Amino acid sequence: MNKNPIGVFDSGIGGLTVLREITRLLPEENTIYLGDTARVPYGSKSKETVERYSFEVSSFLLKHGIKMLVAACNTASAFAVPRLNAELKIPVIGVIEPGARAAVEATRDNRIGVIGTEGTIKSSAYTVAIKRLNPAISTFVKACPLFVPLVEEGWSNDEVTELVAQRYLQEMKDSSVDTLVLGCTHYPLLKDIISRVMGGGVRLIDSAEATASEVKRILAASGMLNSRNEKVNHRFFVTDSPERFLSVGRRFFGENLSEAELAHLEG
Amino acid sequence: MNKNPIGVFDSGIGGLTVLREITRLLPEENTIYLGDTARVPYGSKSKETVERYSFEVSSFLLKHGIKMLVAACNTASAFAVPRLNAELKIPVIGVIEPGARAAVEATRDNRIGVIGTEGTIKSSAYTVAIKRLNPAISTFVKACPLFVPLVEEGWSNDEVTELVAQRYLQEMKDSSVDTLVLGCTHYPLLKDIISRVMGGGVRLIDSAEATASEVKRILAASGMLNSRNEKVNHRFFVTDSPERFLSVGRRFFGENLSEAELAHLEG
């Protein structure tokens, strides 16, 4: 039994979709979330920079006594989780392994597509993780840099976004994938449009649920679940002004997101 | 006579449009450019954060012996130039004052529109600068957050971008402005589309040229122009990987952009 919080971080607000699934599946757990909004986005930046930022963010969360660290950001998962896992003394998971596993379980024709930021796609992290689970699977990848700003603009159900999705996903349709990994935490907000463009037969894999299950499995296996029947605490930190985080973040997490504190990271 | 370089900074690559005008107008001048690509964009971030970043970037450039500092970024100009100007010992200019002056000279009906990032628009910096020059002028403002990612995606002449521009600029058209300030260094790459949407009668003001003239005026007035007939030197620094900066930056600066060095800022 361990009532210390689970630490969750993201470059900004997208990771709230992962946090939401964790709090749904594990309602007894305390959590602490950090959105690195002063340096968002990570998706267009290099491995070295994303790795450095992820370590700075993790140091902050470790000082708050977290029992486990979740990189709720695909780019950070791709670039930083291996080294975080090797160097930190607590369990560290990203969203890529759980998402890859869910996709491998879902595919019937062994044809999986992956969409994400430039960084995630360039890293080949999903392709590597999928091939490791089943080398017979063919993967098809596509970076979709405009999806994040479109979601942040609030145009998740908009003809402009549908037009952009048609452009980005045409090759993916031509490749006849039967499963598509939404390899960025913003993309679940585009599920309706992506599903319409890809066609109903294609399964969309959202890593958030799979990641929450993995968090539960690890905490249970190591006897670290919180079973105390106390009021749980969800703390939110950001590195830039909380106002924008709160207004946009509610689209990701719901109306319970009422307060965020400013975090000062050490470079 | 002073052959020290002119320092120019931006959150990323957009400021290259300003640097290009400076090097055209002042071909004898050495320059040093810093794009803060590890933390781009500034446009969606708070005043405090943008101000802090601008001071860190300026410290780096000051160590390279610059004789003048140009904030070639509208958001940094809006949020940080007043304090930079008060605290640094060299002349500091932003792009807002020159752009505002050019707009005031261009308008006939005293109706000026301003488009820019969220930060620039929220700051009201253009409105304040325009009203100071002529209080009788009416201003109309609109934040256009998707324009930057659309330019960076290379969709500067694309039906998607035209659709987005129609959406963003409809109110501006309804306001019957006769002059529109392109209040973000990325927007000159959208001149064709913006002009088509607004109609040929509306003058588009690009701060880059006006800023370059102001740089020349200040250097001339203070006897700091470089008149030596030596080979000039243009150095480029970025805070994240140079590769992306070079490939995207050529759309802004031309093929002469061949090398960029990695800068390590002190936080």
Image (tube, coloured by chain):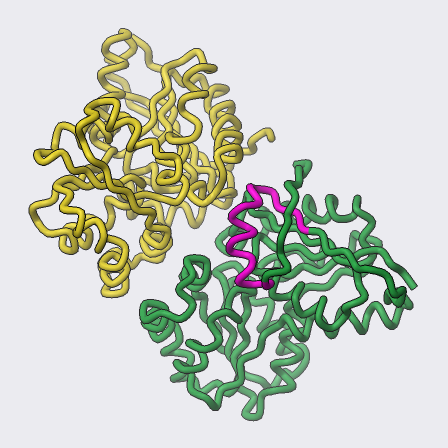
Chain colours: A green, B yellow
Tell which of B166 and B149 is nearer to you: B166
Compared to B27, does A7 lie above or below?
below
Across and down, in percent, residue B258 comes to: 36, 41
Across and down, in percent, residue B225 comes to: 26, 13
Q: Main secondary structure of the magenta part?
A: helix
Residue at image coords 43%, 64%: A147
Give the left or right position of residue B56, taking residue B79 as reference.
Answer: right
Q: Is residue B118 magenta?
A: no
Residue at image coords 63%, 76%: A100
| Residue B130 seen in this snapshot | yes
Compared to A248, does B10 lie above or below?
above
| Residue B211 seen in this snapshot | no
Compared to A140, does A18 lie above or below?
above
Across and down, in percent, residue A19 comes to: 67, 63
Residue at image coords 88%, 67%: A227
Q: How many marks?
A: 0
Name the quarter where the N terminus of chain B is drawn: top left
Give the left or right position of residue B217, taking residue A137 as reference.
Answer: left
Range of residues picked out in magenta: A236-254
